Amino acid sequence: MQLIANQWYPVLQSPEVGSRPLGALRLGERMVFWRESDGTLHAHTDRCPHLGAALSRGTVRGDRLECPFHGFAFDGSGTCRHIPANGADGKIPKGMDVKSYRLREEHGLVWLWWGEARASYPSVPFFDELATGWRSTTLAIDWPVHYTRAIENQLDVAHLAF
């Protein structure tokens, strides 16, 4: 999927991510979203680097996401911090980390940065008018089209009835 790089994209509503890992296909990639026990939100590729299990089927324990297959534990940055079979002080081999995505929670939404890592990130795009008295709702529909076609269709009000 081709997307405009170096942009914030809304990918979920904040309340969708609770105490359990949430798997979702976003921006053409399978991702897992999860919260630490203190509420801090994270997102990673939804695939354990060991044998490919879906991390979204795992468990959150404190500040780590555990793989459901062998219990590999990942922190919020995607770094593997524990492999149960290697013991409490066991060495973790290279290549056991998962890709992590930069997130922000603003305006009731989870925003994901799609682009190059930076020292600082631009603000999340939003219309001030929406923050002062406007109400909104979200409707999720899967369209088998490129996202630009879906947006174009919704902006053409003559199509809304169809």
Image (cartoon, rainbow, N blue to C red):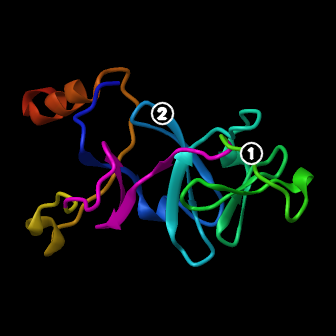
Horizontal and vertical percent position of residue 86: 89, 53
**First along the sequence among labels 1 and 2:** 2
Residue name at image x 48 percent, y 33 percent: 29
| 88 left or right of 66 in image | right
- Dividing the picture into quadrants, the one containing residue 102 is bottom left
Q: Secondary structure at mark 1?
A: loop
| x and y percentages locating residue 146 in the rendered image | 29, 23
Around disc 2, counting alpha carbons within 10 Å, would you say few (fewer than 14), some (14 to 19), or many (20 or more)? few
Residue type beneath disc 1: Pro
The circle drawn on residue 93 is 1
Q: Is residue 120 magenta?
A: yes
Residue pictured at 47% horizontal, 65% vertical: 15
Residue type (three-letter) at the residue carrying disc 2:
Glu
**Element marked by disc 2:** strand
Q: Is residue 64 left or right of residue 121?
A: right
Q: Nearer the viewer, residue 90 or 160?
A: 90
The residue pinned by badge 2 equals: 29
Q: Quadrant of the C terminus?
A: top left
**Magenta span of residues:** 96-122
Residue for point 8% across, 28% down: 158
Give above or below for 11 relative to 60.
Answer: above
Label 1 CA crowd tier, 10 Å (few <14, some 14–19, many 20+): few
Q: Is residue 58 above or below residue 30?
A: below
The residues bearing labels 1 and 2 have C-alpha atoms spaced at a distance of 25 Å
Does 91 sit left or right of 115 as displayed? right
Residue 88's quadrant in the figure? bottom right
Q: Residue furthest bottom?
A: 38
Quadrant holding the N terminus: top left
Q: Is residue 11 magenta?
A: no
